[in-house]
Amino acid sequence: MDFDELLKNIIDKSGLSKEEAGKRILEKQNELSNLISKEGAAYIIAKEMGLDIFPKVDRRLEIQNVVPLIRDLKLSGRVVNVSDIREFESKGRKGKVASVILGDATGTIRMSLWDDQTEIAEKLEPGIAIETFGAYTRDNKIGGVEVRIGKKGGIKILEESNLPTLEEIQKGSQRTMRKRIDQLKEGESAELRASVVQIFENKIFFNVCPECGKSVKKDNDYKCAEHGKVEPKKSIVLLGVIDDGTGNVRAVFFRDVALDLLGMKMEEVLEKETGIFSDMKILGKEYIMLGKMRKNRMFDRMEFVANHVREIDIVHEANKILNRLA
């Protein structure tokens, strides 16, 4: 929406004259040391006045078309996977978070549920069809998109749906996304069936906001751009190498994906300073991994950033091969 349209909407909905509206916008720019555009100042004025100047749009999208920074998202999907509920503590307040993988005919996406919303996760199981309302999206910082439920949003279980079955979603994902390592190109999202052949022992820990999961750095205090001063929690990134017989590539596993790979909770990882992989059966084990190929500019090499990892189901994979041969 350009400035002239913004200004007209403010005038129409507020009853201000063009001169008065323009004056308020200019004052807002001056108040903010002219660090924002006149369009940005107009948005702030409209919000401060409680004006609804944005057109109503039915944002019902297929998963493949979901991008960051969508508001009021309506998304229908079938539950593919529900994670365990993880607990954390910040400023003496305990919180909870759970992840749900949703799928439709076009792909899959992760939805995060926080605090009281985790009660929803307890009612979900693979195969259930749902629809979100009052949802929004954000960049998950590892090359993908994440769905969040707003304060006035929620989830509705669909008794009837035109969504494909869980098995069809898994088969569709296999047909459209399953790749070999030697086929991967920069920027391409894919599903891999690969073995972990190396995990580097030098685990990398970093601090994140316990509310939103964004990285935070310490000045005098730890501060999150969205939640202000916080008591950070530790998160982890694992670096390794995966191989599928056609080639190998460095792999990066962030946060919950790293913990899923380890089969451990963060507290257990922090307690074990060294030798964390020596007594584990990760190496040589096959996994199904969803993620994206990216170029690490610092080291000038390709790497696969995983956003979902699960142990391979041999029977399920064998049935897929038989179905393709039938």
Image: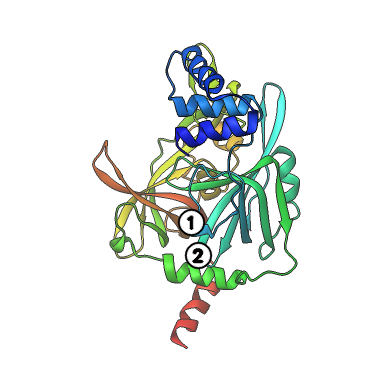
User: How many numbered marks does the figure carry?
Assistant: 2
- Evaluate whether residue 70 shows in this view: yes
Mark 1 residue type? Asn
**Pointer 2 and pointer 1: residues touching (CB < 8 Å)?**
yes
Q: Which residue is mark 2?
A: 106
Circle 1 crowding by C-alpha within 10 Å: few under 14, some 14–19, many from 20: few
Q: Which residue is mark 1?
A: 65
The residue at the point 48 percent across, 59 percent down is: 64
Circle 2 crowding by C-alpha within 10 Å: few under 14, some 14–19, many from 20: few
Residue 90 % position (x, y): 66, 25
- Evaluate whether residue 208 shows in this view: no
The residue at the point 42 percent across, 46 percent down is: 143
* Lower sequence index among marks 2 and 1: 1
Q: Examine the image and state in which quarter residue 226 appears.
A: top right
Q: Examine the image and state in which quarter residue 259 appears.
A: top right
The residue at the point 42 percent across, 16 percent down is: 34
